[in-house]
Image (cartoon, grey):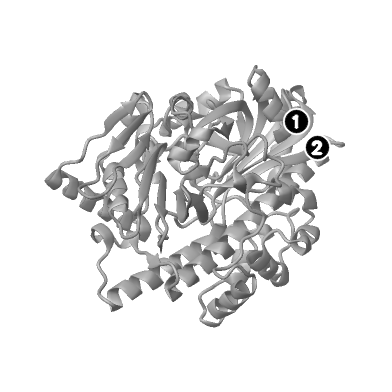
Amino acid sequence: MHLMARSHQQRSQKIVLTTREQSVNELIPTGDSTAILPAGKNVTPVKVFGNEVIRNSFDSICLQQAINCRKAPGVTEVILNPDAHCGYGAPIGCVLASPTHIYPGPVGFDIKCSMSLLQTDLPEDAVDDKRTRRELIHAICRRIPTGAGKGSRHVPNSRRITRAIGNEVLTHGASRQATNELGIPDHWTSRCEDSFHTGHDGSADCLKMRLEELRNEKGFQNYDRKLDQLGSYGGGNHFGECEIVEIQNNDHSRCVADVFGLQHRRIAFLSHCGSRGIGHRLATGQFQALENHFDRWNISYPADDKQLVYAPIGTKEADNYLDDMAMGANFATVNHLLINALVLEAFQEVIPGTQGNLVYFISHNIAQREIIRGEPTWIHRKGATRALPAGHATLKNTPFAQTGHPILLPGNPQAGSAVMVGLPDAEKSCFSVNHGAGRRLGRRRAIRELDQQQVNASFEAADILTNCRSYPRDEAPAAYKDFEQVVQSVESAGLATQIARLRARFVIKDASAADD
């Protein structure tokens, strides 16, 4: 058994025992799609967003993790979104707010795992022909590798990443130098939630110093190989999808879609990935360093869970984490931008003359310093998406100041995905919503229970092509929650409204596990 999987299983068993002994606090509904989860004396309860169907999908481990987070030092608020399920220390699909502490667990190993959407000018019938779709899949896969450890050397038409450009990306994000050298349109940076991240002191210089420190301490083993993953999808739930955009049939949606750059009944491409091996190495190093610090000084872990290590803001430990998180986030940003540039290049090879533009790039695994109810607060979004509505101060001088920014929510290839926009009531969720559908079945359970032939047949019936000989069962639509219930919960709670649906025509996944 893989070490991380074994650790996760042991932790889960431990929490189950705890909940059996103490009995799980029950959710108390406060509306059709809202509830609270009591977390004990002297702390406000966990806020929960989800209708009755969704609330019934939360298991005891997920709820106990939320309670553990709420009781942790410096935490002022915890939110469970409709996609919430058990995660590393904190549930995936949660928000943790703290003005005074930074928590790596509620960010996770894939720092700045994100979504991006590329809109093309191609009409929907441009991909009706299966042969054309298959050619597009091959053209994309010749440029963008998929799977753990895979980098540009594994495909013939990717960009070659030098150490110099890799260093620039880590320390300056989507700088003019990086975008020009990698062939990324400069104006796409205005379509990013954040096109670059600075270090703990607000500068790139401290990131340069931190990178040098890590390299000197050999904290970056196989550094060049990890840089080589720039412009690649990972494994697991990472994907690329060719979509048909269907704008909702109302004036508000059409007006907002126009600002977003969405085009009705035209082809778009949706991507989900993060900071790859770079982010994982940085996150792993931080967990190890903080656990060593806790053990050396005999500091108690929240809920006796090492995965809830933390650092008070202003300490050296916090500064190091913020610097490492910023470098991982910078890598993830340029990774997405390069993927979209390569996807557009692939479309232009198969369908000459294709034009495209980035709609938006938005993260869902990151901690960001924001003003919440008048107080500077570190908002940790673990599988959660920022949802700033029209007029929010953060959107001033962006293309989305008058509408709110796009929210990109993946469902599954057969149910579709959604583009939404935040509403003023999102303030009650720290301006956050879910990051997708959320898992219904764990990976092992999905592989054990789902029939491979039925999974493959469902894609054939839906006329959705993939690059997989057999679609990974642990990523099959049945492994995820009902996306309609998830979206309904968000809209019913008044957090966001749907602008468009995306209907998949083909999917790019890491097929290695399924194909073995």
- Report the number of numbered marks: 2
**Type of amino acid at the residue the image marks with label 1:** Thr
Along the line of sight, the residue nearer the viewer: 98 or 300: 98
Residue 498 on image: x %, y %: 57, 27
Q: Quadrant of the N terminus?
A: bottom left
Which residue in the rendered view is the most extreme toward the bottom? Answer: 216
Tell me if 305 is positioned left or right of 483 in this view. left
* Residue picked out by circle 1: 132
What's the distance in space between the residues labelled 1 and 2, CA to CA? 8 Å
Circle 1 packing at 10 Å, graded few (<14), some (14-19), many (20+), is some
The answer to which of 472 and 502 lies nearer the viewer is: 502
Q: Residues within 10 Å of mark 2 (few under 14, many from 20)?
A: some
Q: Residue furthest front?
A: 374
Q: Which residue is mark 2?
A: 350
In this view, 96 is above or below 391: below
Res. 133 visible in picture: no
The quadrant where residue 197 appears = bottom right
Quadrant housing residue 55? top left
Q: Secondary structure at mark 2?
A: helix
Do the CB atoms of the residues marked 1 and 2 lie less than 8 Å apart?
A: yes
Q: Is residue 273 above or below residue 487?
A: below
Query: In the image, is 329 to the left or to the right of 382?
Result: right
Q: Extreme left residue here?
A: 21
Q: Is residue 466 left or right of residue 217?
A: right
Residue 21 % position (x, y): 12, 47
Residue 52 point in image, percent of width and height: 33, 25
Mark before the other along the chain sequence, 1 or 2: 1
